[in-house]
Image (cartoon, rainbow, N blue to C red):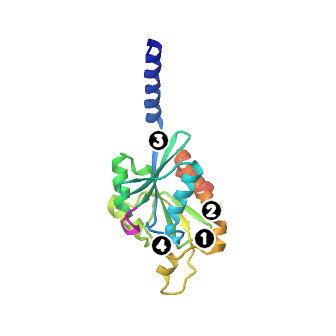
Amino acid sequence: MGLFDFFKRKKGDADVDIEKQDMKRYLIACLGNIGAEYVDTRHNAGFMVADYMAKEAGVSFESCRYGDMAKVKVKNVELLLLKPSTFMNLSGVAVRFWMNKEKLPLENLLVVVDDLAIPFGTIRLRSKGSDAGHNGLKNIAAELGTQNYARLRFGIGNEFSKGHQIDFVLGKFPPEEMAKMPEVLKKCSDCIKAFALSGPGFAMTHYN
């Protein structure tokens, strides 16, 4: 290898290091339950968002500690799409582990979760808030010691009779909603990118 090639290689390494330093990283924790029986169920709306974004970016998920992860680059930002394997009620274990491992501040966390309180087709971004009785959010708050983290709520509606909430949440989206799903998932993807690139205020104004 000639002297010119040596310096060219060293410069290339430095460029890569600088690029890594400049790239801001976000953990996008998309909640759901693992297992074939939970595929396309309302409680797995978070997983569906993660799958859509990975496919959109042409990247694949890899098995990792406490879940599957895919990395999506958007301009100068890297989104770490996490699908926890801990099941919904222990989602906080996976979130806390990856926040610590990647040394991310709380403002670089966004949790994607299903929500009974808003109708299907509606999404709502909040920079903080209560768990609203959602076991996944409840466990994340317990593990992180705070509720002051951003969450993107994916509306699934509440069209169930008294005493059948669990059946509804764990039930599959009906065909008419699945037909509209690509549009809703794209809206979620665009909102998440706006959150990372322009901040929660901008994303809330444009996508809520």
- Residue extending farthest to the top is 3
Label 4: how many Cα within 10 Å (few below 14, some 14–19, many 20+): few
Front: mark 1 or 4 = 4
Disc 4 to disc 3: CB gap under 8 Å: no
Near-viewer residue (47 or 121): 47
Disc 2 to disc 3: CB gap under 8 Å: no
Magenta residue span: 85-90
Residue identifier under label 1:
120
What is the secondary structure assignment of the residue under circle 3?
Answer: strand
What is the secondary structure assignment of the residue under circle 2?
Answer: helix
Q: Please name the residue shown 55% across and 45% down the image.
A: 197
Residue 30 within the magenta-colored segment of the rendering: no
Q: CA distance from mark 2 to mark 3?
A: 26 Å
Residue type (three-letter) at the residue carrying disc 2: Val
Front: mark 4 or 2 = 4
Q: CA distance from mark 3 to mark 1?
A: 32 Å
Near-viewer residue (111 or 125): 111
Residue identifier under label 3:
24
| N-terminal label among 4 and 3 | 3
Disc 2 to disc 1: CB gap under 8 Å: yes
Numbered mark located on residue 184 in the image: 2
Residue type (three-letter) at the residue carrying disc 1: Phe
Q: Is residue 192 left or right of residue 106?
A: right
Q: Please name the residue shown 45% across and 44% down the image.
A: 25
Residue type (three-letter) at the residue carrying disc 4: Glu
Q: Quadrant of the N terminus?
A: top left
